């Protein structure tokens, strides 16, 4: 029995790829509905998609009180992949899910042979994080900033989510230490939308890796995630043409 809830798709017996969704979302929303599972399946990949702790079908999986969410989740994912008899794998992370993907790569560099980060940059701090976390834990708490209210509304939109756990993600999520990212010899693809506000800082994240390429696709945020050309580029990156 796995720790997290998982969806599986793609080609049975193909090279494995793990898709990590963003904060306040779930694997189905970020990757099934945007065409990733079908597109990577057509490329011959076996696709594994977890819901993160506190999210979606994993809402009942709570983080230890003092845990850094991304690192703890990476540990849970590797344990689950062992139970699912998955050996080597590629990993793709969208938005905040990129931190989990990066922790997977530094935790198991001998198993992760490709790393893809979509819509990520080098920042971890969430604007108005303290206010957002307080309201997620206590609906009666006051909200002062429209941006914070928008973030809280996004978290509340899916009634399955465990909001105090989402608050913990906001407060504690971190990238792995820069030296650990720099020590990776795993090929890395960073993808960002041409209209995404992260585009300006994405090169700073790319510079932390030994072997990273940065690509730009049309759109902003979820529109960029669902760009068919992005799925095609990722598939070619994960399964290079023979010869």
Image (spheres, helix red, strand yellow):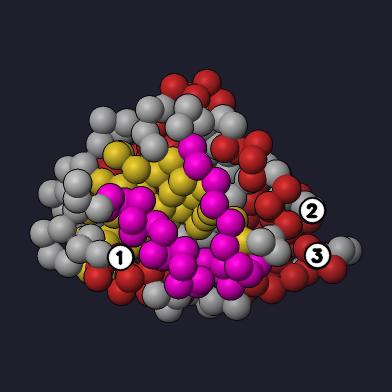
Residue 111 visible in image:
yes
Residue 219 lies, in percent from the top left, at: 63, 69
Q: In whole angstroms, how far apart are the C-alphas of marks 2 and 1?
A: 36 Å
Nearest the viewer among 231 and 156 is 231
Q: Which residue is mark 1?
A: 40
Mark 3 touches mark 1? (CB < 8 Å) = no
Residue 184: in magenta span: no
> Considering only vertical position in the picture, is 59 above or below 159?
above
Left of 71 or right of it: where is 158?
Answer: right
* Labels 2, 1: front one: 1
Q: Earlier in the sequence, mark 3 or mark 2?
A: 2
**Disc sitting over residue 128 in the figure:** 2
Mark 2 touches mark 1? (CB < 8 Å) = no
Mark 2 secondary-structure assignment: loop
Residue 167 lies, in percent from the top left, at: 62, 55
Q: In whole angstroms, how far apart are the C-alphas of marks 3 and 1?
A: 34 Å
Counting every numbered tag in the picture gives: 3
| Residue drawn at the location 62% of the way across and 61% of the way down | 193
Q: Earlier in the sequence, mark 3 or mark 1?
A: 1
Mark 3 secondary-structure assignment: helix
Mark 3 touches mark 2? (CB < 8 Å) = yes
Left of 156 or right of it: where is 51?
Answer: left
Report the magenta residues as a range.
Answer: 212-240
Residue 13 lies, in percent from the top left, at: 11, 59
| Residue drawn at the location 23% of the way across and 60% of the way down | 45
**Disc sitting over residue 54 in the figure:** none
| Residue drawn at the location 70% of the way across and 64% of the way down | 195
| Residue drawn at the location 25% of the way across and 46% of the way down | 89
Q: Which residue is mark 3?
A: 147
Looking at the image, the residue that sits furthest to the front is 243
């Amino acid at each position: 029995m796995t720790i997290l809830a998982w969806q599986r798709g793609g080609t049975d017996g193909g090279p494995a790829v793990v898709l990590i969704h963003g904060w306040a979302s779930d694997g189905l929303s970020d990757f099934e509905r945007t065409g990733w599972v079908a597109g990577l399946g057509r490329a011959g990949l076996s696709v594994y998609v977890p819901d993160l702790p506190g999210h979606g079908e994993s809402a009942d999986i709570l983080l230890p009180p003092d845990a850094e969410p991304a690192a703890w989740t990476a540990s849970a994912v590797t344990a689950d992949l062992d139970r699912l008899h998955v050996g080597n794998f590629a990993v793709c992370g969208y938005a905040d899910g990129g931190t989990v993907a990066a922790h997977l790569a530094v935790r198991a560099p001998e198993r992760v042979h490709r790393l893809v980060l979509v819509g990520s940059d080098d920042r971890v701090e969430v604007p108005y994080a303290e206010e957002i976390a307080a309201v997620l834990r206590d609906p009666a708490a006051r909200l002062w900033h429209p941006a914070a209210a928008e973030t809280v509304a996004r978290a509340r939109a899916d009634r399955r989510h465990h909001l105090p756990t989402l608050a913990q993600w906001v407060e504690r999520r971190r990238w792995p230490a820069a030296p650990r990212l720099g020590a990776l010899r795993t090929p890395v693809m960073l993808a960002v939308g041409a209209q995404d506000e992260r585009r300006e800082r994405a090169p700073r994240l790319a510079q932390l890796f030994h072997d990273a390429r940065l690509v730009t696709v049309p759109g902003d945020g979820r529109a960029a995630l669902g760009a068919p050309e992005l799925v095609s580029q990722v598939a070619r990156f994960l399964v290079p043409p023979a010869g």
